Image: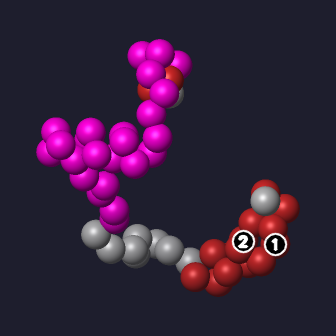
Amino acid sequence: MIAWKFSLDCSSSAVWWLLHRHGWSWQGPARRALERDEQAVGLWKKDVWPQAE
């Protein structure tokens, strides 16, 4: 996206460094969703994920 939008070629580490320099950080979820169905997730990982690779 950066290369396309700004005609710059940056590595992922360079992008991380620039974002960090400007006060940005990676944000992850604070907790798992209460609605999460572990059995459905397990089936998806077993059946669907291998086909996506």
Which residue is disc 2 drawn over?
44
Quarter of the figure with the C terminus: bottom right
Q: Could you say where residue 40 lies in the image, as x and y percent from the top left?
A: 66, 76
Please tell me whether residue 40 is drawn above or below residue 15 in the rendered image. Answer: below
Location of residue 14 (image quadrant): top left
Q: Could you say where residue 3 lies in the image, as x and y percent from the top left?
A: 50, 23
Residue 24 makes an appearance in the image:
no
Please tell me whether residue 40 is drawn above or below residue 5 in the rendered image. Answer: below
Instruction: Identify the secondary structure beneath mark 1.
Output: helix
Question: 4 or 37: nearer the eye?
Answer: 4
- Residue at point 77%, 77% (across, down): 46
Q: Could you say where residue 38 lies in the image, as x and y percent from the top left?
A: 58, 82
Please tell me whether residue 30 is drawn above or below residue 17 in the rendered image. Answer: below
* Magenta stretch contains residue 19: yes
Location of residue 21 (image quadrant): top left
Question: 1 or 43: nearer the eye?
Answer: 1
Q: Are marks 2 and 1 in contact (CB under 8 Å)?
A: yes
Q: Could you say where residue 39 lies in the image, as x and y percent from the top left?
A: 64, 83
Which residue is disc 1 drawn over?
47
Residue 1 makes an appearance in the image:
yes
- Residue at point 46%, 72% (across, down): 35
Q: Which residues are magenta?
A: 4-29
